Image (cartoon, grey):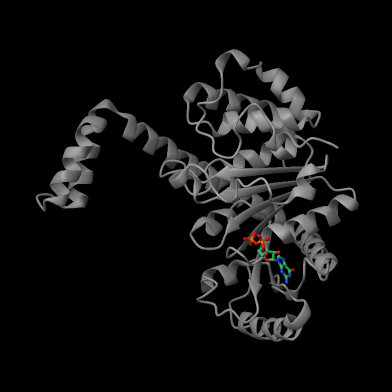
Amino acid sequence: MPVDHSLNTEFPGPVNPGYHLKKENLKSVSEYANGILTGNRAMLAKAITLIESSKKEFHELGNAILEKCYSNTGNSIRIGITGVPGVGKSTFIEKFGMHLIDRGKKVAVLAIDPSSSLTKGSILGDKTRMQTLAAHENAFIRPTPAMGMLGGVAGKTREVILLCEAAGFDTIFVETVGVGQSEISVKNMVDFFLLLMLAGAGDELQGIKRGIMETADMIIIHKSDGQNIENAGLARHNYQQALSLFPPHPSGWKTPVQTASSIDNNGINEAWETITTYYDTVNKSGFFQKNRNQQLVNWLHDAIENELKTRFYNLPNIRKKLARFEREVLAGKLNPARAATELIKLSQ
Ligand code: GDP
């Protein structure tokens, strides 16, 4: 049976502050890059660990690997998938992923893990998810930790997408739990955004804000099987009507609402047909490239912000004085805006 190196590597994988990386085990930039470019998943997994590392020397090595691979990136369709816990995301991705692999695709799944920065371990790191897919040689599954304040919600996901593309993965899923702000950052790094919902659970219960529905390129009412088929059809109709009240997408695309069951294998091929229709349409209209260009510019700005923040908080003077300023704000002696101005002055 093929071994999934993303889940079985000398590096820890899921939650990944870099302390398991050993300097003496490191290889050269070319060795990693060549490994990735020839589709070696173990090398890919290690390079991701490096790029996600919070230690400067590891992180810089990861960046150098990415730079070497950069001209081989971009050749994929990037699909964001969101929905509340329990909606069936991992079951769906497994079915959908296998469906695509059967059609000759290479599938990478990056699961953004919102809990990891708090708990240092998590449900998304659970190795029992997507077992069939994980074991397939044309798949690569990787939980990616949502970083703390400095890395932004999606941490290094953009870099990880590029590394997966360099390794030949042509269909990239970025999975996020639809309960926080992470789906907005994911929307900003994918070509197509899919929202999974359930019939009969109120919008509030599903934690789905109007904004998320508005940005979706397809909504799937999931678990449309057994006694639930009728409800799912009804929900499909209602959501489709609700969507018609939203302003049109900048691409001109009209978001379809479909039903699917990962258990009964229904609606899986239809979901892929919608994605390929979308891809063909926006490719022809030029929106696909326009959107990717906008995302690149956004990335540049995010990177500047992150770098500035990191430098600021690492300044010895700021490290020394931040706690005192926090105390003064809490004691009501300083307002936060004033404190920020003073601190920034101290950084110059
Ligand atoms: P996630 O938290 O969104 O990743 O959801 P999971 O994929 O872990 O699924 C949550 C539960 O829903 C599991 O018990 C699955 O077996 C079940 N489930 C997933 N897909 C379907 C489906 O298409 N139909 C039904 N009836 N149950 C499903």
Image point 86% across, 50% down: which residue? 101
The image quarter in which residue 92 lies:
bottom right
Side of 14 relative to 263 (left or right): left
Q: Position of residue 321 (x, y in %)?
A: 19, 34
Is 246 located above or below residue 170 in the figure?
A: below
144 relative position to 153: left or right: right
Give the quadrant of the N terminus.
Answer: top right
Nearer to us in this view, 264 or 331: 264
Question: Quick check: 291 left or right of 229?
Answer: left
- Identify which residue, 238 or 215, lies in the foreground: 238
The residue positioned 66% from the left and 68% from the top of the image is: 196
Q: How many marks?
A: 0
Residue 319 visible in the snapshot: yes
Outermost residue, top side: 24
**Residue with the most extreme left position:** 333
Determine which quarter of the picture holds residue 25: top right
Vertical relation: 316 (above or below) 86: above
The location of residue 219, given as percent across then percent down, is 68, 71
Q: Which of 303 and 236 lies nearest the eye of the viewer?
A: 236
Q: Quadrant of the C terminus?
A: top left
Q: Quadrant of ligand 1?
A: bottom right
In the rendered image, residue 193, in percent from the top left (x then y), is placed at: 66, 61
**Which residue occupies 49% across, 59% down?**
181
Please give the name of the residue rendered at 83% of the width and 36% of the height, measured from the top-left corner.
2
Tell me if residue 166 comes above or below residue 316 in the rendering. below
Quarter where residue 278 is shown: bottom right
Q: Is residue 348 visible?
A: no
